């Protein structure tokens, strides 16, 4: 049910009032019953809940309230470009407000939502990691995204460059059964509804802009099969302080958080800590001991995070049944048939290696080896890295 213009204006006024955070706003809502009731209450009653300075701020409409109200009405009334996408604003307590967020210490007052708003959140896994992953890390995130979608799990991430974007892209590669995304109540793998989102992008800006701009096309694809969500008012630019704050939403929406490549100072470790504090499972993909992007994952594993090699490991950790398309019977976890062996790959391992070293192991002419590497690169089985190195790529099984 959509809010009327008076209720929307009241929510925006509460959101924009200086010095009123989520905690103070919740106390006010509890005391006065509804958002409109806050702004008809006298100052003395407001001061029973908040400080004098906060009560005085509530009595004065924010300077930008009119502009934000007009902008929000225009945004809501404009049809999105993505197929079947819609726009909505869900205040805390709304029937469509995602239930996991209600358990946060500071749940958002308002959620701006764009995409398949008629659908809902099913069982989900949050996937986070480096903005500058290795080729192997990028492919791993994409393959885990697809494998999770095939297992009936929603992939939640932050739409950032690197691991975030790759995990969204992987989930979107899943060719859903006919009718997925409709209003059918049938169940697919992992017990998720056909009307649940494939992927959710939680962003740190207003939803009237896409950040990074490189992900304009990806944002449209996400909104065609899932949703973008933000707690920030329209027009909010990509401020550095907002991204760690939005990470708590990413952690809360998933039953667990999977970290795919993270350096020791990565913000992904903050998300993992948030997930752990919320009682969620934390999982990590191991990588090369020579890659800085793997050091954070290895640290998490030493601290007790689940070492994950395939999607079955994730589903077992979350205690979720594994289903296949054939009769919804349990399977081994969606493993794929291994590609045929290759003499060059057999000598590579998964650590970056130089052409000279590989030539020594393979005992091939330079021109022959370069040709084989080019074919493997085109097949997506080898990546060319800076410094003239090559790395074998491996899909999770």
Image: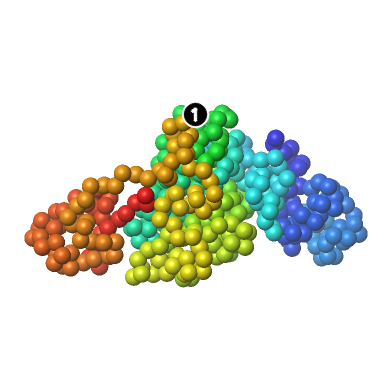
Residue at image coords 28%, 50%: 380
Residue 312 image point, x, y percent = 44, 49
Instruction: Indicate left or right for 324 with 343 as reference.
Output: right
Colouring of the image? rainbow
Q: Image point 90% across, 57% down: which residue?
A: 45
Between 46 and 229, the one nearer to me in the picture? 229
Front in this rendered view, residue 51 or 181:
181
Query: Which residue is the extreme one toward the left?
Result: 365
Residue 60, visible in the rendered structure:
no
Q: The N terminus appears in which quarter of the rendering?
A: top right
**Which residue corresponds to the image point at 46% horizontal and 31% vertical from the top-left?**
327
Q: Position of residue 374 (x, y in %)?
A: 19, 53
Instruction: State left or right for residue 50 relative to residue 144.
Output: right
Q: Position of residue 32 (x, y in %)?
A: 85, 50
* 168 and 219: which is toward the camera: 168
Q: Is residue 232 visible?
A: yes
For label 1, the residue is 179
- Residue at the spot 76% in from the left edge and 56% down from the top edge: 25
Is 197 on the left or on the right of 64, as rendered? left
Q: Secondary structure at mark 1?
A: loop
Give the side of residue 10 with respect to residue 141, left or right.
right
Image-quadrant location for residue 326: top left
Q: Residues within 10 Å of mark 1 (few under 14, many from 20)?
A: few
In percent of width and height, residue 248 lies at 60, 58
Where 362 falls versus 125 (above or below)? below
Find residue 373 and report its image quarter.
Answer: bottom left
């Amino acid at each position: 049910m959509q809010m009327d213009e008076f209720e929307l204006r009241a929510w925006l006024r509460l959101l924009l009032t200086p010095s009123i955070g989520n905690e103070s706003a919740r106390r006010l809502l509890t005391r006065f019953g509804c958002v409109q009731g806050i702004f008809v209450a006298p100052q003395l009653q407001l001061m029973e809940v908040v400080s004098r300075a906060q009560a005085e701020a509530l009595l004065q409409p924010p300077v930008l309230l009119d502009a934000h109200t007009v902008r929000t009405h225009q945004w809501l009334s404009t049809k999105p470009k993505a197929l079947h996408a819609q726009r909505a604003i869900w205040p805390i307590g709304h029937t469509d407000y995602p239930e996991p967020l209600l358990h946060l210490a500071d749940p958002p007052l308002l959620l701006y939502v764009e995409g398949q708003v008629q659908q809902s959140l099913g069982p989900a896994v949050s996937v986070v990691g480096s903005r500058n992953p290795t080729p192997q890390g990028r492919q791993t995130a994409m393959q885990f995204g697809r494998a999770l979608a095939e297992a009936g799990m929603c992939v939640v991430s932050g739409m950032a460059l690197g691991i975030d974007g790759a995990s969204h892209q992987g989930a979107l590669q899943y060719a859903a059964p006919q009718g997925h995304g409709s209003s059918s109540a049938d169940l697919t793998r992992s017990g998720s509804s056909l009307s649940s989102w494939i992927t959710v992008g939680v962003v740190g800006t207003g939803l009237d802009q896409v950040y990074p701009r490189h992900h304009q096309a990806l944002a449209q694809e996400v909104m065609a099969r899932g949703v973008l969500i933000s707690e920030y008012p329209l027009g909010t630019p990509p401020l550095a302080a907002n991204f760690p704050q939005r990470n708590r939403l990413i952690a809360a929406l998933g039953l667990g958080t999977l970290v795919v490549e993270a350096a020791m100072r990565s913000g992904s470790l903050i998300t993992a800590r948030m997930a752990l504090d919320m009682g969620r499972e934390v999982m990590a993909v191991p990588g090369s001991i020579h890659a800085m992007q793997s050091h954070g994952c290895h640290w998490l594993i030493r601290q007790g995070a689940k070492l994950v090699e395939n999607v079955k490991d994730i589903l077992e950790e979350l205690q979720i049944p594994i289903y296949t398309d054939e009769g919804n019977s349990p399977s081994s976890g969606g493993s794929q048939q291994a590609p045929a062996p290759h003499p060059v790959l057999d000598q590579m391992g998964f650590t970056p290696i130089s052409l000279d070293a590989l030539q020594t192991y393979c005992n091939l002419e330079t021109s022959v080896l370069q040709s084989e590497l080019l074919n493997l690169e085109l097949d997506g089985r080898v990546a060319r890295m800076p410094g003239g190195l090559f790395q074998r790529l491996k899909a999770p099984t």
